[in-house]
Amino acid sequence: QVQLVESGGGSVQAGGSLRLSCAASGRTFSNYAMAWFRQAPGKERDFVAAITWSGNKYYLDSVTGRFTISRDNAQNTVYLQLNNLKPEDTAVYYCAAGTSLVVVRRTPGYWGQGTQVTVSS
């Protein structure tokens, strides 16, 4: 089992920044690919960014250049830096873990509880 706990959400104005954190516990964190998803009200949960155990990164096109995913294997934590936020970024952001990049992007085995990000215009 892997337990994931997100933090760092909040309310900001457009153009602002937030840093989300996801602390993992349980099995060896460095063995897992990690990802962030988001779900806006009335919409499906969408992939945002992923990072492999070796540090390769992948992003949703609309966040490329604004969001940065990173991980600290020593701290068992994955981060998502959100810059130049837009109102359409408003959503609950979820951390996820999977045994590979393909798995974490499609069918993650583990989810956090989510953290709310609200961007006002």
Image: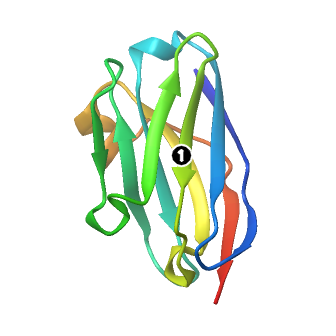
* In this rendering, position of residue 89 left or right of residue 25: left
On the image, the x and y values in percent for residue 10 come to 76, 63
On the image, the x and y values in percent for residue 67 come to 45, 55
On the image, the x and y values in percent for residue 103 come to 29, 36
In the image, 103 versus 119, the foreground residue is: 119
Q: Name above or below for residue 120 compared with residue 19.
A: below
Pointer 1 local density, CA inside 10 Å: few below 14, some 14–19, many at least 20: many
Q: Residue at x 31, y 18 (%)?
A: 54
Q: Name above or below for residue 41 compared with residue 55.
A: below
Identify the image quadrant of residue 63. bottom left
On the image, the x and y values in percent for residue 99 come to 35, 24
For the N terminus, the quadrant is: top right
* In this rendering, position of residue 22 left or right of residue 101: right
Identify the image quadrant of residue 107. top left
For the C terminus, the quadrant is: bottom right
For label 1, the residue is 80
Identify the image quadrant of residue 25. top right
Q: Residue at x 50, y 81 (%)?
A: 88
Is disc 1 placed on a helix, strand or loop? strand
Q: Residue at x 30, y 37 (%)?
A: 57
In the image, 41 versus 69, the foreground residue is: 69
* In this rendering, position of residue 93 left or right of residue 113: left
Q: Name above or below for residue 106 compared with residue 63.
A: above
In the image, 9 versus 68, the foreground residue is: 68
Three-letter amino acid code at the position of disc 1: Leu
Q: Name above or below for residue 44 compared with residue 97.
A: below
Name the colouring of the figure.
rainbow
Q: Residue at x 64, y 49 (%)?
A: 19
Residue farthest to the bottom, as pictured: 121
